[in-house]
């Protein structure tokens, strides 16, 4: 039962994370007038997503009683690194730029730094998504085996 509760929490976060990655982020850049506005929206939405992933990952790791506990720790750790380290570095970088970072000349090292940090942020979000998916699938399979 504890695994099921952890999986339900993970599935709720998983839905939000996939919706953000597949709909919100691309939609913001497609619809909003500038990358500065779209980036502002993303910066506003990502922290709650990462903090929720951190909290849910920790709760899932604590509730999970099997060896699948690692998925909760991985989810929490990925969200923590993305929000507490990578996002802070991105914010510091943005503070040095007037306007969107991607409007800088390609030779500007800040643009390369932003691209690297953005890539890392995406990588950690994907790691958290995969971890949540592992928890959900494992709980579903475990529940299916117990109901036979």
Image: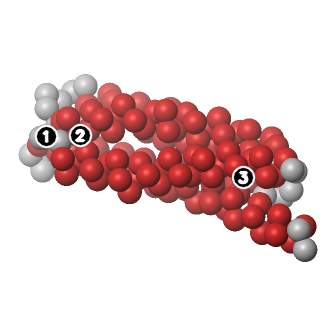
Q: Name the residue under label 3.
A: 7
Bin the neighbour count of mark 3 within 10 Å (Cα to Cα): few under 14, some 14-19, many 20 and up: many
Q: What residue is rendered at 90% in x and 67% in y?
A: 146
User: How far, Cα to Cα, is label 2 from label 3?
Assistant: 32 Å
On the image, the x and y values in percent for residue 40 come to: 27, 33
* Image point (17%, 30%), residue name: 97
Picture coordinates of residue 42 (x, y %)? 33, 39
Q: Secondary structure beneath disc 2?
A: helix
Residue 34 - label: 1
For the residue pair 56 and 16, the one nearer the viewer reads as 16
Circles 1, 2 touching at the beta carbon (< 8 Å): yes
Image: 21 above or below 100: below
Percent coordinates x, y for residue 71 in the rendering: 70, 54
Between 112 and 41, the one lying in front of the other is 41
Q: Quadrant of residue 86?
A: top left
Classify 139 as above or below 94: below
């Amino acid at each position: 039962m504890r695994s099921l509760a952890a999986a339900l929490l993970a599935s709720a976060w998983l839905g939000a994370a996939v919706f953000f990655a597949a709909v919100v982020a691309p939609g913001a850049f497609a619809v909003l007038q500038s990358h500065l506005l779209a980036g502002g929206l993303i910066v506003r939405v990502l922290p709650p997503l990462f903090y929720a992933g951190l909290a849910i990952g920790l709760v899932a790791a604590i509730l999970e009683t099997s060896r699948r506990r690692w998925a909760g720790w991985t989810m929490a750790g990925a969200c923590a690194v993305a929000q507490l380290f990578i996002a802070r570095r991105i914010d510091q970088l943005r503070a040095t730029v007037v306007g969107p970072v991607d409007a800088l000349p390609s030779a500007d090292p800040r643009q390369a730094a932003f691209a690297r940090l953005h890539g890392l942020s995406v990588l950690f979000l994907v790691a958290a998504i995969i971890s949540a998916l592992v928890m959900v699938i494992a709980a579903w399979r475990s529940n299916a085996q117990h109901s036979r």
